[in-house]
Amino acid sequence: MTKYAHITGWGMAVPERIMTNAELSKLIDTTDDWIVSHTGVRERHIAAPDQSTATLAVDAALKALELACLRPDEIDLIIVSTSSPEHVFPATACLVQDAIGASKAGAFDLSAACSGFIFALNMATQAIRSESIKTALVIGAETLSRFTNWEDRNTCILFGDGAGAFVLQASDEPGGVLSAVMRSDGSGGDLLSVPAGGSHLPASHETVSKKQHVIQMNGREVFRFAVRVMESATRESLEKAAIPLEDVTLVIPHQANRRIIESAVRGLEIPMERCMVNVDRYGNTSTASIPIATIEAIGAGRLKAGDKVVFVGFGAGLTWGAAAAVWTGPFLAPVKRKVRPVSYRLYARTRSILRRLWRHIEGIIWGRNNLDW
Ligand SMILES: CC(C)(COP(=O)(O)OP(=O)(O)OC[C@H]1O[C@@H](n2cnc3c(N)ncnc32)[C@H](O)[C@@H]1OP(=O)(O)O)[C@@H](O)C(=O)NCCC(=O)NCCS
């Protein structure tokens, strides 16, 4: 029997600190009017020093698990899509796995910039549909404020920090994520990049002084590319899922720029009311923007069980993609289990400390340099 991948839990986390356009205009030569008229952004959330991509991802993940009524040890796979990982390695997903105590999950990061959440959603869906796993946690998380040049008015006005997570579960019931389109064009890689800090240009005094470790962007080219691909990816994913555009309750696009979204909506010939926009309050949270917008749409009563929805995004790479789904909502467990995020956090922390301690004891027993097991 064919398995379907249903979205049964969701959660989001954004830093408390809000940075308004007025505040930005004290740092750089810009105005609230310019930013709003060119991008639609009014404010964005910025991570506090003790917050990072992993801490936001963990907060979002635990909320999603609570809603889905699942314990972390029931998760088979964790994918964290991010362009601002905690480290080059280990993967942020492994840190999330440890912090929530998902003791049976494989975990890895996926790097496809702002399209990453769609790519990750598709990877998790395919793993469920092929019956290799039953339950997945897909997280989009960013702290791009750490990779922003706060002196560059072209880019620093755009981005914000945040995380959003979906729980996917297998079921024989038709529905859930039904199709996805994933595309890339590396010839445009230089249009939006963080050039230094990788193997090509390792971090050095020179790269830091030349500001090569922060976001560089050709805004006009990215704008043109985005407008070109949003409509076609949306139509293609709906066609693959055999869902007519008229039946779609909500289009949830990547929240990069209100003008890009409006132009995609014009191309699709649908009214703006059928498209979710919240870029004004979060800015571009990159791969986190689609789950955050989805969760706000649910909160506003714009997305309910049974509704047809299409997610569409684009970003650095260049990458772009879309996924069509029938919205599900939590599976009701026979007896609704209480899932307490706080207790899981404590349990996971204890488990992590014990595992470190055990590794230390093992080192003493076997001898630090003895590898003859
Ligand atoms: C970045 C972006 C908002 C710039 O808007 P734009 O209309 O293309 O503006 P331009 O770059 O053509 O600049 C127009 C003028 O505004 C100025 N300008 C640029 N940023 C400004 C700012 N923050 N405040 C005031 N003026 C600004 C420019 O210097 C330029 O001035 P000039 O004409 O005297 O040279 C727009 O190109 C964009 O949103 N691109 C897509 C970026 C994106 O979404 N990236 C993420 C993808 S996931």
Image: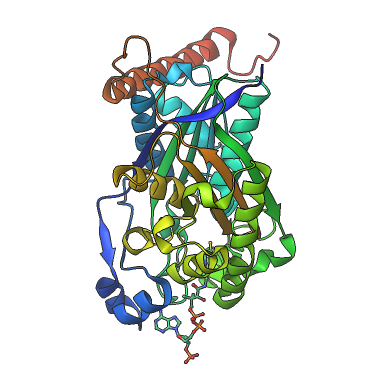
At a point 44% along the width and 52% down the height, the residue shown is 289
**Quarter of the image holding residue 305?**
top left
At a point 42% along the width and 52% down the height, the residue shown is 143
- Residue 78: percent from left, percent from top: 53, 30
Q: Quadrant of the N terminus?
A: top right
274 relative to 352, above or below: below
Q: Is residue 129 left or right of residue 298?
A: right
- Residue 185: percent from left, percent from top: 72, 60
Q: Is residue 342 left or right of residue 356?
A: left
76 relative to 228, above or below: above
Q: Quadrant of the C terminus?
A: top right
Residue in the foreground of this view, choosing between 9 and 262: 262
At a point 48% along the width and 53% down the height, the residue shown is 251
Residue in the foreground of this view, choosing between 326 and 137: 326
**Quarter of the image holding residue 190?**
bottom right
16 relative to 76, above or below: below
Tell me if I can see residue 101 in this picture. yes
Tell me if I can see residue 31 in this picture. no
Q: Is residue 99 left or right of residue 221?
A: left
- Residue 312: percent from left, percent from top: 55, 53
